[in-house]
Amino acid sequence: MMFDFHMVVCVKIVPKPEEVRVDRESRRLDRANARSEINPPDMNALELALDLKDRTGGRISLLSMGPPFFEMYLRVGLAMGADHVYLLSDRAFGGADTLATTYVLAQSIRKIEDVDLVLCGEESSDGATGQVPAGLAEWLDLPQITLVNRVDLNLEDGLVRARRSLPGGHEIVTAPLPALLAVKTAANEPRFMDFRRRPWAMADGRVTIWDRKALAADPALCGSPGSPTAVSGLEQARVRERKRLFLQGEVDELAAQLAAILEANRS
């Protein structure tokens, strides 16, 4: 039986880690010269949603916050199998920490309505705080399951059953719908974009853009004003050089020297 099950996948567009720089004056990431990509853990969340859609039916909405140029990256998710994109774009959202970000995301999910399951990657590659899934679940008052790598649905009983990845094993957790899942990084292998679907994904009407007013969001809770977190300073991490020793002599002498070194450093 196929159900009209609505999933929202939160997607962040991030700079490629090897190309990003930090502005020492503003203490923020300078992504001006960095190429962008969909946050890899969010791709795992999208793949999990697409797998559920393949098995149970339903539809997938992608949700992201950022400038208008993010749209071109989000349409890749449409070509992979998602059904619609909601892009939250307003200068009032700029400079947001995880608290302000989750507030705006929560406001948009309330506006979308009829959402049965929210999926997030466990963290972003640029911030790596892992706070967004939990913060969003709190704003929406939803049960949450973290470290998810596999999901099954029991829509007749209104339940989601997820497997959580833990050190040395896993556990199975069941929660009532609607719920929020934080998907473990590398939980699956995201599929490629379907090029037959690409013309549809690039067509007009696939992306809805909302600003602060459209969300009826409190300006005091958005962007920099709504962000209690501030970077107080930056320090360059010290690079520890590995000690190098060059041993000389015959084979027996080298073996004795090496044994003495290992014995001296055994503790």
Image (spheres, rainbow, N blue to C red):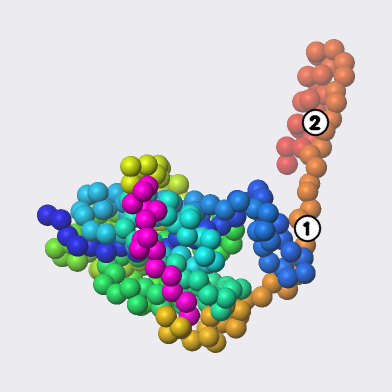
Residue at the spot 33% in from the left edge and 42% down from the top edge:
196
Residue 7: image location, x then y, percent: 30, 62
Residue 237's quadrant in the figure?
bottom right
Residue 149: image location, x then y, percent: 37, 51
Residue 49's quadrant in the figure?
bottom left
The answer to whether one can see residue 169 in this image is: no
Q: Residues within 10 Å of mark 2 (few under 14, many from 20)?
A: few
Seen from the viewer's position, the closer of residues 169 and 137 is 137
* Dot placed on the residue nearer the N-terminal end, 1 or 2: 1
Identify whether 188 is placed above or below 155: above
Residue that badge 1 annotates = 236
Seen from the viewer's position, the closer of residues 254 and 71 is 71
Report the number of discs.
Answer: 2
Residue that badge 2 annotates = 261
| Quadrant occupied by the C terminus | top right
Residue at the spot 31% in from the left edge and 58% down from the top edge:
83
* Image position of 32 (left or right of 190): right
- Extent of the magenta region: 198-212
| Quadrant occupied by the N terminus | bottom left
- Give the SS element for disc 1: loop
